[in-house]
Image (tube, rainbow, N blue to C red):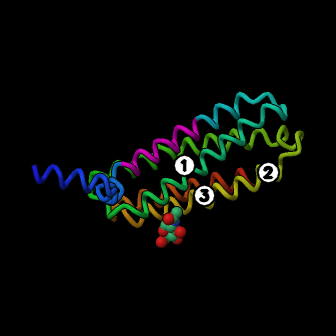
Amino acid sequence: MAGKLFVILLLGLGLVNASPIAKRSVATDITAITTDVQKLDSDITGWDGTLLNAIPLLSDVTTIKTDINTAISDTNSSSTLGSSDSTTVTNEIVALQPVIATTLSDLAARASDVSAIGFTSTVQSNLEDLKTLADELTAALESKVTSSDVTKIETAATAIDSSFASAISAY
Ligand SMILES: *[C@@H]1O[C@H](CO)[C@@H](O)[C@H](O)[C@H]1NC(C)=O
């Protein structure tokens, strides 16, 4: 009874929520980013080239930025990942890399349509922002995963950077 009362008091004070971010939430964050990028890609390929229908694309990018920032701060708040959690998040990044590559290549293919609606510099600056965020996320993850997973994330990060570089040069 006294134990139960103590728990209720802790819950009331919000102390129970003060525990570190659960490690699995980083994996959930990366899953969300993957879903966001897939949505952006399908919106890019389905885009009719009109200004009006470009608005959802910008909102997709805003969502990606928000979700990458969440993943970075959850990663930073997480303690060092044990080998199972490390494998999970590493596999997610490795799987996300080709999704990013396809999306950026689909975006690069629409450069003349983007130019036609006057959005070239908007896309360019969004690509720069996303590249910076992707770099920050992979660096944050590298500081938490096991040493063999660091190498795998570095390889994925290099490929991601190179996809950004190609897309940026198309704009
Ligand atoms: C995450 O940690 C890195 C390295 O300490 C720091 O540069 C960055 O600002 C942090 N980002 C967030 C969103 O907490």
Residue 61 falls left or right of residue 7: right
Tell me if I can see residue 115 in this picture. Answer: yes
Q: Which residue is mark 3?
A: 161
Q: Point out the tag, 2 or 3, that comes first from the N-terminus.
A: 2
Q: Would you identify the image quadrant in which residue 51 lies?
A: top right
Q: Point out the tag, 3 or 1, that comes first from the N-terminus.
A: 1
Which callout, 1 or 2, points to the residue nearer the camera? 1
Residues at marks 1 and 2, CA–CA distance in whole angstroms: 20 Å
Q: Point out the tag, 1 or 2, that comes first from the N-terminus.
A: 1
Q: Residue at x 57, y 36 (%)?
A: 38
Q: Which residue is mark 1?
A: 67
**Which amino acid type corresponds to the residue marked 3 in the rendered image?**
Asp
Q: Which residue is mark 2?
A: 122
Q: Residue at x 27, y 51 (%)?
A: 84
Which stretch appears magenta?
25-38
Residues at marks 2 and 3, CA–CA distance in whole angstroms: 19 Å
**Which amino acid type corresponds to the residue marked 1 in the rendered image?**
Asp
Task: Indicate yes or no whether the magenta region holds residue 30.
Answer: yes
Q: Would you identify the image quadrant in which residue 146 lies?
A: bottom left
Callout 2–callout 3 Cβ contact below 8 Å: no
Judge the density around disc 3: few (<14), some (14-19), many (≥20) Cα neighbours within 10 Å.
some
